[in-house]
Structures are given as C-alpha cells and as structure tokens.
Amino acid sequence: MEKVLEKFTIDDVEVGDRFRSCNNVDHLVVKKTKGYIYLMGFGWKDDRIFDRYKLIKRGDKTETQTEQQTTSIKSVLSGIDKLLEYKDRKYGNASSKDRVIVFGNKCSFGPVLDNKLNRVASGEELLKNDLVDIAGYLILTLREKGWDDFSEFMD
C-alpha cells in the first residue's frame, strides 16, 4: 500500500519514492543529496518545487518481493541456459569449430554472415531460416556498399 504525502520536506524524501505531479504523472527519485533530489528524466530539483507535487512513499520491500525478483532473474537465466544448450546441440557448436571466414571485416555484416555460413556448414540439414538470414544480410551488405544497379550483369 502506497503512502501519499501532500505536505513534506526533503527529509521525508528517499531514493525510490515518486513525485506525483498535478497531472498524475509520477517521477522517480533516483538520487538525493543535501538540499537536492534527482528526478529521473528531470534532473536536479530543490525543495522549492515540493508544493507542486505529492510524495508517494515507496512501500517497504519485503523479503518476499526480493525473493520474487531473484526467482525471476534465475528463471530468465535458466531459460537462456536451455536456449544455448539447444542451439549448441542443433548447430554443433559452430562458434568453436574450425571456422570458415568468407567475409571477415570486408563489410559491417561480415562477422554475422560468417557465423551464419558456419552454422549452415555444421548443421545436419539446410534450414529455411538460415537461408533467409543469409539473404537478408547479403542484401543489407549490398545497400551498405551502395550497390543498387546490376545492369552490368545483364546479357
């Protein structure tokens, strides 16, 4: 439950509290020093502005909230771990095998194209997704080089 203060001093303000404007827009307090507070996106403010805002006190963080945040991070990391294991199995760890360098640093998408080509080389079958990725990066490379006229190749 949030606590709303209509009248307050700088001593009442803590990092994590929010200032609510007359339009009901909240601004997070991200830093506090003697005589000044820093509102995210609004810079440093002194106590002369306090009469234009309500102070929304942050609720006390319970251990349960902290545990939920930690669990959420662990859940994300677990999901990333599963994804990396899957890709490693599926693509035969293309990033660590003997790599073929075709484009190198000849263009900005060179390293990405080389990764895609190595993924195809180490995979068991040709995947539509890989071909679309390669085609897309080749087209972006053509644009990067400013090559949009191919009439010289017409017989």
Image (cartoon, rainbow, N blue to C red):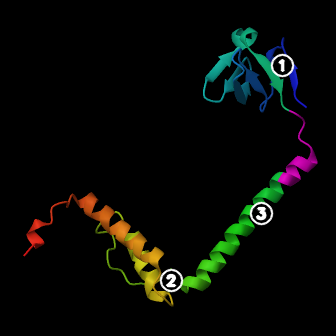
The x, y position of residue 53, in whole percent, is 74, 15
Give the residue pinned by disc 3: 75
Foreground tag (1 vs 2): 2
Instruction: Classify 59 as above or below 116.
Output: above
The stretch of residues the image draws in magenta is 59-68
Q: Is residue 14 above or below residue 95?
A: above
Q: Quadrant of residue 74?
A: bottom right
Give the residue number, with chain letter if any, for mark 2: 94
Q: Is residue 133 magenta?
A: no
Q: Is residue 130 left or right of residue 40?
A: left
Q: Is residue 66 located in the magenta-colored stretch of the structure?
A: yes
Amino acid carrying mark 3 in the image:
Ser
The amino acid pointed to by label 1 is Asp
C-beta proximity under 8 Å, tags 1 and 2: no
Within 10 Å of disc 3 (Cα), the crowding (few <14, some 14-19, many 20+) is few
Q: Which residue is mark 1?
A: 11
